[in-house]
Image (tube, grey):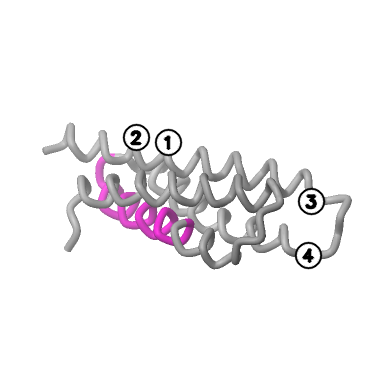
Amino acid sequence: MLSPKVLVMLARLAWVIALIIGVLIYGGHTLRIEFHVIPGAIVAFSLIGLALMARPVAGFLSVIGVLVALLLPVVGLLQLTDVDSLKPSLTGVHILLALASIALSEILAKKLRSKA
């Protein structure tokens, strides 16, 4: 089983990679979307792992963590639809969820550290 320290470090690294690739894709570089999805999935799975570990000490915050981790890829995939009028809004929501995911990862890891 992975420790909270490993999960939060994994989330940090994957988040930075996903952010850089996401900015490049948004800027018009022709990168394959999979290069962004894989580190994004690592962030989401790390957040779910942290949320499940922190459930006894974090309570409802753990539920929020799981919801954010599930919404992040859903909103990301919705950006690939052909509805151009929704694209800016979906991009903004996706960025906010990405920021929330790393913030929640840090908060949950801190709660787990303080418990130990």
Select label 1 or label 4 by which is in front: 4
Q: Which mark is residue 107?
A: 2
Marks 3/1: CA distance? 24 Å
Crowd band around label 1 with a 10 angstrom C-alpha radius: few (<14), some (14–19), many (20+): some
The secondary structure that dominates the magenta segment is helix
State whether residue 13 is above or below residue 96: below
Q: Earlier in the sequence, mark 1 or mark 4?
A: 4
Question: Horizontal placement of 4 versus 83: left or right?
Answer: left
In depth, the one of 109 and 61 nearer the eye is 109
Q: Which mark is residue 81?
A: 4
Q: Quadrant of the C terminus?
A: top left
Marks 1/4: CA distance? 28 Å
Marks 3/2: CA distance? 30 Å
Marks 2/1: CA distance? 6 Å
Q: Quadrant of the N terminus?
A: bottom left
SS label for mark 3 = helix
User: What's the amino acid at mark 2?
Assistant: Ile
Marks 4/2: CA distance? 33 Å
